[in-house]
Amino acid sequence: MGNGFIKIIDWYIIKKYLGTFVFTCAIFTVVCVVFDVSEKLDDFLKRSAPFSKILFEYYAGFIPFYLNFLSPLINFIAVIFFTAKMADQTEIVPILSGGVSFKRFLWPYFIASSLIFVITLFANLYVIPHTNKLMIGFENIYIKPVSDNSKTETHMQIDKNTYVYIKSFDNVQKVGYTFIMEKFNGDQLVEKLMSDRIVWDSLKRKWSIENYSIRTVNGLKEKMISGMKKDTTLDMRPVDFQVYDNIYSAMSMKELNSRIEKEKIRGTGVMQLLELEKYKRFISPLSAFVLTLMGVSLSSRKVRGGIGLPLGIGIFLSFTYILFIQFSTMFSLKGGLPPIVAVFIPNILFGALGVYLMIKAPK
């Protein structure tokens, strides 16, 4: 009798949790889209953005991106809303009075949050990068086109012994200006190439070096040759010189890992951004467990005034959680905090707060 009762309650809580979560996601989606349309409508009309692209590129990326970004807030509000409502309707007291421990009461919550965790993790690794690429591509053409999206004064190491410098790179024409490549044997310079222009050939997938001179050094002997044009294969691509916002969030895990391995050699100064993006994809879904624990512990007690007080506290804490994520990210980028530590800090702090609230929760 008791076991059957508990199973019924488990399903009841799981359905309430997931139903409220989906409903809250839908509400946030409608609100975000309405506000965004009102803000971006002038840009859509000004640049004659096709409706199909607005729908299937921009909003196909916008909605997953913001649902993913706001999922901690949505999850927390959903848990607090229906749990506080259960407490207000005196549904939790009989469960706990019937011999069910508070930890056992948490089981269906963590079953539901595990499902949200798996879906969020899958989306972070395989869906969001693709939809971000659609959204960013649309934004760069129809919303905030960048007249000059090229890096200047770029220094890069492309392998153990080879260093390159490009004064400026035009990502529209795929042309670099004032290109220098130096090859070393240990500390000794063995070859230096200087060129006026370097052009990416997308058909051959090679670089064409124009108006170049090559100086080779062999001990005390030096040799200088020059030419008008030569094709060569280098471990760099035009994408390496793009400066669009959020470009790393549009990379697949394979592209991201490849970029990280190359950055270990190149040292162009974007390692923090790359590692933050990678670790966030794996660690941010843990918020489903952290905020569920906090939400249940905070809202399972019946209070005067109904669900208003726990819901208000929950909204405040969820915004604080998102704020902590932004602060830890800035500390990593500006203060040298290791990216993996920066990504874990909000979950550790709020996880500890969740454990404290669980201990203080009604038994």
Image: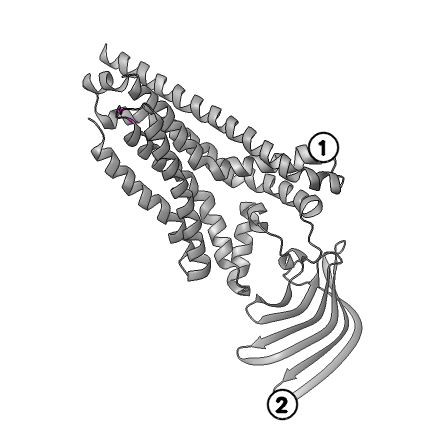
- Of mark 2 and mark 1, the one earlier in the sequence is 1
Classify residue 322 by image quadrant: top left
260 in relation to 220, above or below: above
Q: Nearer the viewer, residue 189 or 95?
A: 95
Residue at image point 40% right, 57% down: 338
Q: Is residue 352 visible?
A: yes
Q: Nearer the viewer, residue 188 or 147?
A: 147
152 in relation to 344, above or below: below
Q: Position of residue 326 (x, y in %)?
A: 44, 49
Q: Nearer the viewer, residue 306 or 84?
A: 306
Count of numbered tags = 2
Mark drawn on residue 220 = 2
| Span colored in magenta | 300-304
Classify residue 178 by image quadrant: bottom right
- Helix, strand or loop status at disc 2: loop
- How far separated are the C-alphas under marks 2 and 1? 65 Å
Q: Is residue 110 visible?
A: no
Residue at image point 59% right, 50% down: 247
Three-letter code for the amino acid on which mark 1 is drawn: Ser
Q: Position of residue 22 (x, y in %)?
A: 47, 25
- Mark 2 crowd level (few <14, some 14–19, many ≥20, 10 Å Cα): few
- Mark 1 crowd level (few <14, some 14–19, many ≥20, 10 Å Cα): few
Residue bearing the label numbered 1: 52
